[in-house]
Image (cartoon, rainbow, N blue to C red):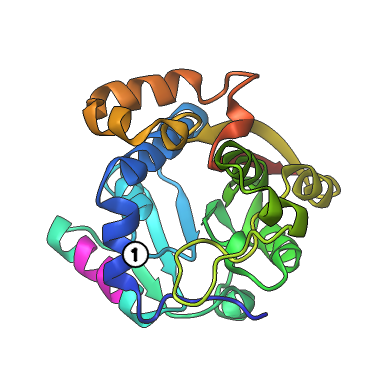
Amino acid sequence: MSDRHFDELATRFAEKIYGGAKGAIRLAVLQADLAEALPERPLRVLDVGAGLGHMSLWLAQRGHQLTLAEPAAPMLDGARQRFAEAGQAATFIQAPWQELLGQLERPFDLVLCHAVLEWLAEPAAILPVLHQLVAPDGWLSLAFYNKDALVYRNLLKGHFRKLRKERFAGEGQSLTPQRPLDPRELAAQLGAQWQVESRSGVRVFHDYMPQEFQAKAELLDLLEMELAYRRHPSFAGLGRYLHWLCRPL
């Protein structure tokens, strides 16, 4: 298994992830968490695996200085276009995470690493690099595909054979991540270098709703309820993604 890049899937990615409620909920939760935690001053921000630049643009529009790193040229081109259309400046680097330390001179106040770990052959290998990229008093915004939610969804569907074989990875051109993360394992890997300051679930109930209810629900209602329950002790761990804000030790 090797790291997965989205060289040929930029358009499909945009439509699948950000073309409906799923993407809107993801952005709403991430933005709410960051707005709550970050200081009110301009920050130097690095977006690792920036994709089409949705989160980076939101931060740039709030006065922060953005550097976007993305290995897939079509995705980075889409991010450049998004910034140009919004009249925002940023630095764009086409590079995988393995090359970043050699290209960046000093650490950042905030590093975003959203929906990256689950596409890596060895997710734990990126963690020491992220630690070097974050300033000693900085933040790491880490969002990842939650194995617990995938198990629960398969339980609800009765996919018991799949669960017994632990076959969770997407295949071929699928946009299902190839390596969902066990949050307990990740917490143990972070433990020596990071303090997790806050934990939120992303889509803690939306993906479990029957499709007819999803179709009838108003987006504003979905966003309100997802934000209200994103840190509920019984529901946060069911989020399809988990968002952790971390400080270096």
Residue 48: x %, y % from top left: 51, 64
Q: How many marks?
A: 1
Dominant SS in magenta: helix
Horizontal side of 173 relative to 133 (left or right) equals: left
Query: Which of these two is toward me, 88 or 26?
Result: 26
Q: Is residue 192 above or below residue 245?
A: below
Mark 1: which amino acid? Phe
Residue at label 1?
A: 13
Q: Is residue 190 visible?
A: yes
Horizontal side of 140 relative to 71 (left or right) equals: right
Horizontal side of 114 relative to 220 (left or right) equals: right
Q: Which residues are magenta?
A: 76-83
Q: Is residue 201 above or below residue 49?
A: above
Q: Residue at x 35, y 74 (%)?
A: 9
Q: Is residue 187 above or below residue 216?
A: below
Q: Is 81 part of what is drawn in magenta?
A: yes
Indicate the quadrant containing the N terminus: top left, top right, bottom left or bottom right: bottom right
Q: Is residue 181 visible?
A: no
Label 1 Cα neighbours within 10 Å, binned few <14 / some 14-19 / many ≥20 = some
Q: Residue at x 34, y 64 (%)?
A: 13
Q: Residue at x 55, y 79 (%)?
A: 103
Residue 47: x %, y % from top left: 47, 60
Numbered disc 1: secondary structure = helix
Determine the image quadrant of residue 54: bottom left
Q: Is residue 119 above or below residue 19?
A: below
